[in-house]
Image (spheres, helix red, strand yellow):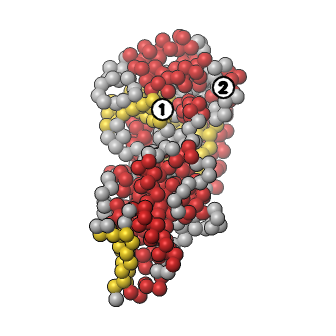
């Protein structure tokens, strides 16, 4: 990728998306690089536009009033943020309501230019959103809205077949008269009408939407998963079905007492669970992967040129965060170059994780020295990075901890570390020790670091530097070089030129 394309992908910009859905009305304001925008303001109101629609298809008047009040608030909030570029879209409830055009006219009177998206376009935007967070994703995208389920196939990030089915939980509650057995029959009938649903190799369901995230959060608690990050949380088909069945059997009071489940979703959640269960069986899904990227992120991703889409979102996010939290620009990139020779045999997917780790190596610099390791560890685990698995987050976090403390892990982090294999833990520690040594050579001085080299030469670990940098290599970097060499099974050697 050329320098201009990379610069555009990393360009900081503020932008916003308003999503007027059948159940929720949401505003997300993003800041950060174009290729990996960070959500900095995420406002939501469960207005229920698709709930209790009249017999002739009109929107519930109370829901309309609630939505308009929410949108007026969003308009005011956007003004306080400097009126960033904003796209507003309305989905199933509004496009299917007999008085949808009247509602849109009232929204536009607030000063919001809203577009009503069709079912196939909504499915396409959901696919764009998943692809923006998971480049080269292959599988079936399912976007569970309040009024409809959008399905679209993905093949290495490219959207294919798409369909919009009117089996959102709010719609099912109305058409099935809140009867779960009747709803299950309606779901099966709708899915049976999708001729391509079992064709091709699409054993992964990329699940999008608040209701399905609630199911994942419920299942995450059942498993006592150590990392409470929903994006890229994975469930086997069996685990997902068990969670769906359990939710469908729960009483309203039991669901209300479940942490992480909004009381306003309690009545719709069993129906959303029925849809997930039915889809897993109808499409022969083997694994469910939760995606934080959906329609809103798809709106942003759709507008990017192809070369920007091709930029790695993990590297874009790590670069942006490092620029905000590291004291000297360019230090992380200097670390990348210095330790490259130690990992010449790594695979491309390993290299991108190492590069991200190097970029983040100094994000603890502004914290108290006693807290830097744990802050860096926690930031790597929970920052809104994309295109990274839970195990890869754990690897980055462990490397950053070792960069500050040497070999080890934070107290109480056993569950997170258990996400890694023994080989992955060893590699993470080696990267951390390499960064620990690199940071001691010339702290926060990337120009000096770039003049040095660190290489493997048979059974030797050779650090070489210009003679004028000799005074920098005192006891501390020598000890850290010894520790790195020991981890790699090599003999440390220091050489100066001149």
Number of marks present in the image shown: 2
| Spot occupied by residue 72 in the image (x, y as percentages of width and height) | 65, 43
The quadrant of the rendering that contains the N terminus is bottom left
Whether residue 366 is situated above or below residue 256 in the rendered picture: below
Kindly indicate the quadrant of the structure image that contains residue 427: bottom left
What kind of element bears circle 1?
A: strand
Which residue is rendered at x = 37% and y = 69% of the image? 491
Distance between mark 1 and mark 2 Cα atoms: 20 Å
Please say whether residue 124 is visible from this viewpoint. yes
Which residue is rendered at x = 47% and y = 61% of the image? 432
Q: Is residue 164 left or right of residue 475?
A: left
The tag on residue 480 is none
Which is closer to the viewer, label 1 or label 2? Answer: 1
| Spot occupied by residue 62 in the image (x, y as percentages of width and height) | 68, 28
Kindly indicate the quadrant of the structure image that contains residue 128: top left
The residue where tag 1 is placed is: 235
What kind of element bears circle 2?
A: helix
| Spot occupied by residue 361 in the image (x, y as percentages of width and height) | 50, 64
Q: Nearer the viewer, residue 89 or 291?
A: 291
Q: Of the two numbered discs 1 and 2 on the same chain, state the one appearing first in sequence.
A: 1
Kindly indicate the quadrant of the structure image that contains residue 256: top right
Q: Label 2: how many residues lie within 10 Å, few (<14), some (14-19) or many (20+)? A: many
Q: Is residue 115 left or right of residue 492?
A: right
Which residue is rendered at x = 28% and y = 67% of the image? 458
The tag on residue 255 is 2
Q: Nearer the viewer, residue 168 or 213?
A: 213
| Spot occupied by residue 108 in the image (x, y as percentages of width and height) | 56, 41
Whether residue 109 is situated above or below residue 481 in the rendered picture: above
Q: Nearer the viewer, residue 50 or 126?
A: 126
Which residue is rendered at x = 60% and y = 63% of the image? 372
């Amino acid at each position: 990728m050329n320098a201009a394309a990379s610069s555009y992908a990393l360009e900081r910009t503020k932008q916003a998306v308003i999503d007027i859905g059948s159940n929720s009305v949401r505003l997300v304001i993003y800041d950060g690089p174009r290729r990996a925008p960070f959500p900095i303001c995420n406002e939501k109101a469960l207005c229920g536009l698709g709930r209790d629609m009249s017999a002739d298809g009109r929107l519930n008047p109370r829901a309309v009033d609630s939505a308009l009040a929410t949108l007026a608030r969003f308009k005011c909030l956007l003004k306080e943020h400097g009126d960033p570029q904003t796209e507003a879209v309305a989905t199933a409830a509004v496009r299917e309501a007999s008085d949808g055009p009247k509602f849109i006219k009232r929204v536009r009177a607030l000063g919001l230019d809203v577009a009503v998206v069709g079912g196939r376009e909504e499915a396409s935007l959901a696919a764009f959103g998943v692809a923006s967070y998971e480049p080269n994703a292959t599988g079936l995208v399912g976007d569970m809205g309040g009024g409809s389920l959008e399905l679209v196939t993905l093949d290495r990030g490219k959207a294919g077949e798409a369909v919009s089915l009117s089996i959102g939980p709010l719609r099912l509650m109305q058409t099935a008269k809140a009867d779960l057995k009747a709803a299950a029959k309606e779901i099966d009938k709708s899915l049976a009408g999708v001729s391509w649903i079992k064709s091709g190799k699409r054993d992964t369901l990329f699940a999008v939407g608040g209701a399905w995230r609630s199911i994942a959060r419920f299942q995450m608690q059942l498993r006592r998963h150590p990392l409470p990050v929903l994006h890229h949380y994975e469930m086997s088909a069996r685990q997902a079905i068990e969670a769906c069945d359990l939710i469908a059997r729960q009483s309203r009071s039991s669901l209300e007492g479940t942490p992480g489940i909004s009381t306003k979703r309690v009545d719709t959640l069993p129906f959303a669970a029925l849809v997930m269960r039915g889809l897993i069986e109808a499409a022969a899904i083997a694994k469910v992967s939760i995606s934080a990227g959906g329609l809103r992120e798809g709106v942003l991703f759709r507008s990017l040129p192809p070369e920007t889409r091709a930029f790695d979102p993990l590297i874009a996010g790590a670069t942006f965060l490092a620029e905000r939290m590291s004291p000297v620009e360019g230090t992380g990139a200097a670390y990348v170059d210095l330790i490259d020779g130690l990992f010449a045999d790594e695979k491309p997917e390993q290299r991108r994780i190492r590069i991200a780790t190097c970029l983040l190596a100094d994000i603890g610099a502004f914290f108290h020295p006693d807290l830097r390791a744990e802050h860096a560890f926690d930031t790597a685990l929970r920052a809104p990075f994309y295109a990274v698995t839970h195990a890869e987050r754990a690897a980055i976090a462990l490397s950053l901890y070792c960069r500050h403390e040497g070999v080890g892990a934070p107290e109480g982090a056993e569950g997170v570390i258990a996400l890694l294999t023994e080989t992955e833990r060893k590699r993470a520690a080696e990267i951390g020790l390499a960064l620990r040594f690199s940071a001691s050579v010339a702290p926060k001085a990337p120009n000096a670091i770039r003049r040095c080299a660190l290489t493997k030469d048979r059974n030797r670990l050779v650090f070489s530097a210009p003679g004028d940098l000799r005074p920098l290599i005192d006891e501390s970097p020598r000890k850290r070089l010894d520790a790195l060499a020991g981890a790699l099974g090599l003999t440390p050697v220091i050489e100066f030129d001149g």
